[in-house]
Amino acid sequence: MQRRLAFLGFSLAIAAAVAGGLMLKQAQAASFELRGQDILVNGTVNGKSLRRFRDFMAKHPDAQRLVLMDMPGSDDDETNLKIGHLVRDLGLDTHVTARSEIFSGAVELFLAGSERTMEAGAVLGVHAWEGDRAADEYPRWHPEHAPYVAYTTRMLGSAQFYWFTVHAAPADGMHIMTEAEIERYGLLTQPVLRD
């Protein structure tokens, strides 16, 4: 009887994990929605996001600002950086609302705004990336860092913020930034917006 209950419990746990994984996959693709001149962005940037964003901008060339809402990050760093460069090339601004929660690659995307604004209450979370090895296991001069260093330098004028993220939390963790850290690393072009 105990074996049957253990097997049943194990089977239910597997089924729940599979269902949860499927729901996460369905919900995670980045979406773009026009509201006036704002583009509301939700979801995870993936390999298809660059094409979707280009197509969206071709249909809505008068859009002015990305409003990053609920973004767990990116599962394709190369695509995420390409979208960020395109955002900067287009001269778009970025904004996070008091309800926004953006993490990892979504924070990198936020950096791309020509003007970057944030309402008090927004959550920005950062951590190191991990490929074959953790980011902080590579020496600073290693080519694995080069795209991130170049991107952050273009967006903020230096790579200091990138090096902060590498050491802020491991890839399987998350560091929620304080307003003081956001200011120290120059993430905003205007002071935090308060009611």
Image (spheres, rainbow, N blue to C red):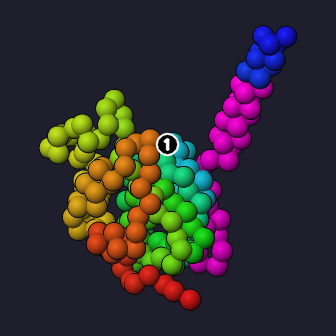
**Quadrant in which the C terminus appears:** bottom right
Q: Which quadrant would residue 153 be assigned to in this image?
A: bottom left
- Residue drawn at the location 31% of the way across and 32% of the way down: 133
Q: Residue at x 49, y 48 (%)?
A: 74
Report the residue that reaches farthest toward the bottom: 195
Which quarter of the picture shows residue 97?
bottom right
Magenta segment main secondary structure: helix
Furthest residue to the front? Answer: 2
Is 84 in front, or is 4? Answer: 4
Compared to residue 95, the image places residue 83 above or below, namely: above
Residue 43 position within the rendered picture, expressed as x and y whole percent measured from the top left: 60, 53
SS assignment at label 1: loop
Categorize mark 1 by other alpha carbons within 10 Å: few (<14), some (14-19), many (20+). Answer: some
Is 84 displayed left or right of 45 in the figure?
A: left
- The residue at the far left in this view is 141
Left or right of 53, for residue 178: left
Query: Which residue is found at the position 29% from the left and 41% from the top?
Result: 135
According to the picture, the residue beneath numbered tag 1 turns out to be 75
Q: Is residue 88 visible?
A: no
Identify the image quadrant of the N terminus: top right
Residue 19 in the image, given as x and y percentages of width and height? 74, 34
Q: Nearer the viewer, residue 149 or 181?
A: 181
Span highlighted in magenta in the image = 11-40
Nearer to the camera, 172 or 131: 172
Q: Is residue 109 magenta?
A: no
Kind of residue indicated by mark 1: Asp
Residue 111 locus on image (x, y percent):
38, 65
The quarter holding residue 70 reads bottom right
Taking 68 as reference, is 104 left or right?
A: left
